[in-house]
Amino acid sequence: MLELRIEGRSFGLPVLGEIFTTICQGDRICLLGPSGIGKTTLLNAIAGLDGAMPDAAVPGRNKMRVGYLFQEHRLLPWRTLRQNLAIVGAGDADIERLLASVGLAGYADHLPDQLSLGMARRAALARCLAIQPDLLLLDEPFASLDPVRATELKQLILDLLGRYPTMAMICVTHDARDATELANRLWYLDGQPACLQWDGTIAAQSGVESLVQRLRTLDQVV
Ligand SMILES: Nc1ncnc2c1ncn2[C@@H]1O[C@H](COP(=O)(O)OP(=O)(O)OP(=O)(O)O)[C@@H](O)[C@H]1O
């Protein structure tokens, strides 16, 4: 679906090196790596936020639709949830359906500030889904949630992935267990500048946690 070719990114100092890989329909990728290594920078590059969006082979289109759940919800705070979803093109019936699908039935006329962090994140997820994305980017979706809410959100994401089987997902996380629960593929980003030190299917790995531990102890895998 997407031949990803990123030649590098720098902010004065190089952050990302060359990243060449392929993202296919239905791929569920967990992206792990040390703090500050460039995971968000990579998501931004994939989403085209820092320049041209990568070309993609999606049936009927030459650009992918990308839904991006940022670390902050980034809903417009002066707009209700209904208005936040309408801005990205959702009709009335879709808005009710999308909010219900993330457990927010009845909240369409609430403002983002009237929601808890977890609810606002789910509303932002509904906004991502409103554009019927080919690729869903999730940047640390469980950060700052208590364990119960994090588990609920993980289950919700699993349900959504089941409902949209062709949608690909890249989820940034610091927890290798998320990879075993959510993903069928693991990217491990490390090095200076950072590259994908590991890009492999999870089914082929017996112990993702031990693999990630091993990767964390390596300065650089050649
Ligand atoms: N807009 C920017 N301007 C300058 N430097 C930036 C910018 N965005 C990111 N950086 C730098 O690039 C590096 C990678 O940042 P990035 O947020 O992508 O890392 P990360 O792996 O997502 O970190 P974390 O796991 O802590 O969220 C950091 O050193 C950061 O300070």
Image (cartoon, rainbow, N blue to C red):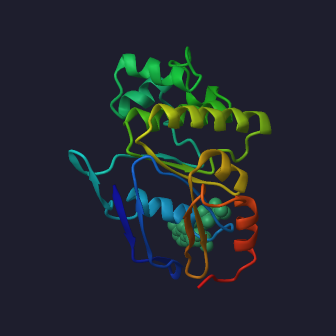
Residue in front for this viewpoint, 190 or 206: 206
Q: Position of residue 96 (x, y in %)?
A: 46, 17
Q: Position of residue 24 (x, y in %)?
A: 40, 54
Q: Is residue 16 above or below residue 69?
A: below
Residue in front for this viewpoint, 79 or 25: 25
Of the 4 image quadrants, the one containing the N terminus is bottom left
Q: Where on the picture, by quarter, is residue 147?
A: top right
Q: Does residue 77 appear left or right of residue 146 in this picture? A: left
Q: Is residue 25 above or below residue 214?
A: above
Of the 4 image quadrants, the one containing the C terminus is bottom right
Q: Quadrant of ligand 1?
A: bottom right
Tell me how many marks there are: 0
Residue at point 57%, 30% (across, down): 112
Residue in front for this viewpoint, 131 or 184: 184
Would residue 75 be visible to someone looking at this image? yes
Residue at point 73%, 34% (across, down): 149
Residue at the far top: name it: 106
Q: Position of residue 169 (x, y in %)?
A: 49, 48
Q: Does residue 40 appear left or right of residue 208 in this picture? A: left
Residue at point 52%, 24% (across, down): 101
